[in-house]
Amino acid sequence: MKVFQIGAAGGVGRRLSTLLSSRGDHTTGMHRNPAQADTIRGAGGVPVIGDLIADSVDELAEKMLGHDAVVFSAGAHGTGHDQTTLIDGQGLEKAADAALKAGVSRFVLVSAFPDSERGTGLGEGFEHYMRVKKSADVYLSHTGLDWLIVRPGRLRDEPGDGRVTAGVAIEYGDVRRDNVAAFIDAALHDPTLSRVIVELTDGVTSVTAAVTHVAASTGTLR
């Protein structure tokens, strides 16, 4: 499998690249900052310069050609309203349009849990982020892509164990980035989980079993 990653140098992205590479898959990691190239190589990916803001849909599509799937885990990471809109919102829309143009049907988006950080007083900037993420989910879900939206809980950096709780609606909780990456890795290799939004936290079910269970429970098993 050839996977095109947007956000490959991030906390989930580089973990996913390592897992995919260990399977023998080929990963291409798009990055804007040249300093991120070594991080992508270190995780087993091939770095390619790209910019969700500056690049056109055609330019992004050209980079995606020949891949089997796109994984979008990029984000503005608190750099302001405008960057959130341009990267998490319009950037996702451009990436989805580019995937369609390039003929890459499988598209996985790392989104945000609807209960994320509620009641913690993070202010209007965070509320804007949540609105943008929801609109991005809506946009992707209305495309003709073979999409999957993963909404992880509160992200943590402790080592994962490959065990999660996953479903279309679950209680909010913590999830280790290792486990998010492992779930996406499993989902990419199981086409039965398709066109569904999955909420994800740490749990007791193996990622492989969780993928199979959610696919069956949503009627996407085929």
Image (cartoon, helix red, strand yellow):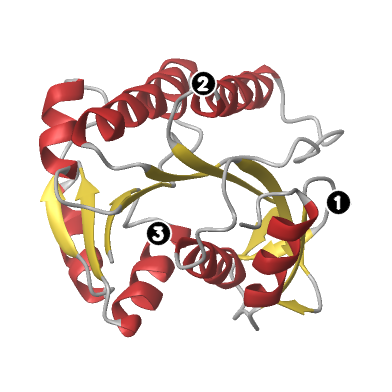
Which amino acid is tagged 2? Tyr
The residue that disc 2 covers is 139
The residue that disc 1 covers is 170
Q: Is residue 94 above or below residue 198?
A: above
Which amino acid is tagged 1? Ile
Nearer the observer, disc 1 or disc 3?
A: 1
Q: CA distance from mark 1 to mark 3?
A: 24 Å
x%, y% of residue 97?
Answer: 31, 24
SS state under label 2: helix
Q: Nearer the viewer, residue 179 or 212?
A: 212
Q: CA distance from mark 1 to mark 2?
A: 23 Å
Left or right of 122: which side holds 91?
left
Q: Earlier in the sequence, mark 1 or mark 3?
A: 3
Q: Earlier in the sequence, mark 1 or mark 2?
A: 2
Left or right of 169: which side holds 29?
left
The residue that disc 3 covers is 13
